[in-house]
Image (cartoon, grey):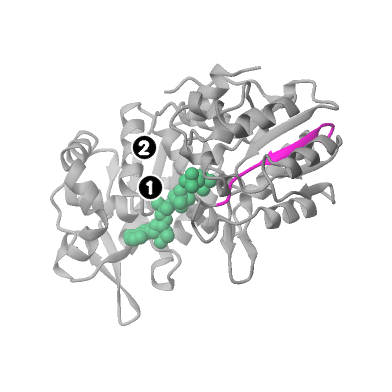
Amino acid sequence: MPEIRFKNITDLDIKGKKILVRADINSSIDLEKNEIRSDPRIKALVPTLEALKDAAVVLIAHQSRFGKPDCIDLKLHAELLNKYLGGTVKFVKDLFGEEAIAAIKALQPGEVLVLNNVRLWEIETKVKSIEEAEQTELIAKLTPLFDYFVNDAFGAAHRAHVSLVGWPKICAGPVVKRELEMVQSLFNPKKPSVWLVGGAKAYDKFLAVKFNLEEGNIDKALICGLTAILMLEAKGIDMGEPNRKFIAEDLDKHRAEIAETCEKFKDSIILPEDMAYEEDGKRKEIDTNQVGSISKSTGDIGSKSIATFKEILKSAATIVANGPPGIFEKEVFKQSSFEIVEAMAEAAKQGAFVCIGGGDMGAVAEMSGHGDKIYISTGGGALLRILSGKDLPLLKVLREKMP
Ligand SMILES: Nc1ncnc2c1ncn2[C@@H]1O[C@H](COP(=O)(O)OP(=O)(O)OP(=O)(O)O)[C@@H](O)[C@H]1O
Ligand SMILES: O=C(O)[C@H](O)COP(=O)(O)O
């Protein structure tokens, strides 16, 4: 487990100070309507800004990736924050040029200034190390203007980009503090601890499960989505070409490692016994060992597997879920995702701690109206990386650059 040590900005005297906060408000954007489709990360940042209301706060954040259509200005994000914070938020379409510097200098305690999308400047992501990040013009120009630097971008904890790691001293913000405390509890979970992994990033999820099985942090791992396809194939079960093409590269590279893990933890790893596919617009189900005989990809786990998973979730004291069990966006494949979130919410009602990471499963929990019972992490890839036992750039700078 990586060493987690940090100073918290709200423990320092912030009154009247100028504070730079690097946040993660990367959101799903509806480009046609020019609006933010869903804003859980923006909402999660509101308490941070409220906690810093005695200071003048400048926000740096990214939206999407350089060159992508949704790599847009942060005007929409600033407008939403302004709505949530009662009119104290300004936006400037600049990052470290004259306009930005003048606006930062003029900012008063109680006000928030959102700088523009840091990934519109290519340098943000081009650096190769923390040392290189420290030498950039962005850091040189902005550093003298601030008393404190805060990293509150848990969702980007796995990135060593300039505005995340380049400042001379870095404290944790409230979002990062809350998420890291939650992560620490997952490394020492109340038992039985049940993980459910699904979604599309099959090998990343496998690695997180493997690490935590080895650490004794998981009693039962319920595997679905493309991770199930990958693990079943590695075990020698034919998932058919239409399924195999999604995981072929990972399978090629990691077959032996995955098969070995499946064997070593065969009592803890629960793979789906049946799966669902679409035929003439209808949901059809089939036993897992028959999937190779149909020339179709599967999009969900079947009813028998859902029942087995739900039964296991019932007695869990800790539940970690990352990635939906099926293609929940499609009517025919949404069954497992919604039923399983119901079962998790029920377990939470009975006292289990339930943490959902990754935008998609979080969206299912929100859509089901269970967002309040379940801990929904602001981290997707970042949470998974930390849970894989990796020492991330965020953890390193919080430890090594404590003010
Ligand atoms: N069996 C399946 N076959 C293909 N796609 C699947 C399957 N099950 C789930 N998915 C898809 O996986 C996608 C989510 O995968 P992903 O690994 O990105 O999850 P996530 O944890 O929400 O990640 P993040 O928030 O980090 O992007 C969803 O769009 C869903 O439709
Ligand atoms: O959405 C995320 O997972 C974070 O904002 C990090 O984004 P990235 O994967 O583009 O660095």
Query: Residue flagged by tag 1: what amino acid is it?
Result: Val
Q: Which residue sits at x=68%, y=49%?
A: 43
In the picture provided, is 106 more to the left or to the right than 270? right
Q: Is residue 370 above or below residue 332?
A: above
Q: Position of residue 235 (x, y in %)?
A: 16, 47
Q: Quadrant of the C terminus?
A: top right
Q: CA distance from mark 2 to mark 1?
A: 9 Å
- Residue 356 visible within the image: no
Q: Quadrant of residue 31?
A: bottom right
The image shows residue 179 at horizontal and vertical percentages of 57, 34
Q: Dividing the image into 4 quarters, which one contains the N terminus?
A: top left
Which residue is labeled 1 in the image?
A: 197
> To which quarter of the image does residue 23 belong?
top right
* Magenta segment: 53-63
Residue visible at 58% across and 19% down?
401
- Given residues 398 and 279, the one toward you in this image is 398
Q: Residues within 10 Å of mark 1 (few under 14, many from 20)?
A: many
Q: Residues within 10 Å of mark 2 (few under 14, many from 20)?
A: many
- The answer to which of 261 and 207 lies nearer the viewer is 207
**With 141 as the anchor, is 253 left or right in this view?**
left
**Contact, CB < 8 Å: mark 2 with mark 1?**
yes
User: Looking at numbered disc 2 in the image, what kind of residue is underneath it?
Assistant: Ala
Q: Which mark is residue 208?
A: 2
Observer able to see residue 1: yes
Q: Quadrant of residue 325?
A: bottom left
Residue at image location 67% in from the left, 43% down from the top: 95
Q: Is residue 88 magenta?
A: no
Outermost front residue: 98
